[in-house]
Image (cartoon, rainbow, N blue to C red):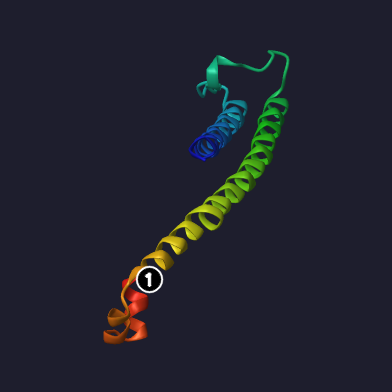
Amino acid sequence: MLGVQLCLLALSVLGLGLSGVALDVVHHALRPEAPSPRWPWGLTPPADWSALHAVFAVACAVVVMALVRTVLSFVYAVSVADLVQGRIVPTLRAEVYEKLQRLSFTFYDRHASGSLLNRG
């Protein structure tokens, strides 16, 4: 689950970074004296591409990353639900019931039922 969380975080940060690159492409197209956009990992679009093509490519990459992030979010949610509801809660419940069954009858006679629930 930790690996999925790291992937989700990386996809989020990368999506924000690519959005910034798209803004830089538009800014450079409108004002040629502005610095050229810095592409991640040194990748640059082909020289014959217009600014519109570059922005479209960035938009497609962001959409693909969003789809991958959606699938990973679903996998993460299912994994967390399985861990919590399928493993942790039943184990804790079994341990509490086991402890309650080991207590003496005098303990139950001295304490009210609400007190027992808080002590379990």
Vertical position of residue 42 compared to residue 96: above or below? above
Q: Residue 46 appears at what percent x and percent y?
A: 69, 14
Q: Residue 59 appears at what percent x and percent y?
A: 68, 35
What residue do we see at 54% from left, 18% from top? 41
In the rendered image, which residue does mark 1 sit on?
Answer: 100
What residue do we see at 67% from left, 31% from top? 61
4 sits to left or right of 62:
left
Q: Residue furthest top?
A: 47
Q: Quadrant of the C terminus?
A: bottom left
Vertical position of residue 29 compared to residue 111: above or below? above
Q: Which amino acid lies under the numbered mark 1 shown in the image of this protein?
A: Leu
Q: Residue 11 appears at what percent x and percent y?
A: 56, 35
- Which element is circle 1 on? helix
What residue do we see at 69% from left, 38% from top? 63
Task: Count up the numbered dots.
Answer: 1
Residue 20, image quadrant: top right
Q: Residue 7 appears at what percent x and percent y?
A: 54, 35
Vertical position of residue 114 compared to residue 78: above or below? below
- Frontmost residue, 48 versus 90: 90
- Frontmost residue, 85 versus 96: 96
33 sits to left or right of 116:
right
What residue do we see at 35% from left, 83% from top? 114
Q: Residues within 10 Å of mark 1 (few under 14, many from 20)?
A: some
120 sits to left or right of 84:
left
- Frontmost residue, 42 versus 2: 2
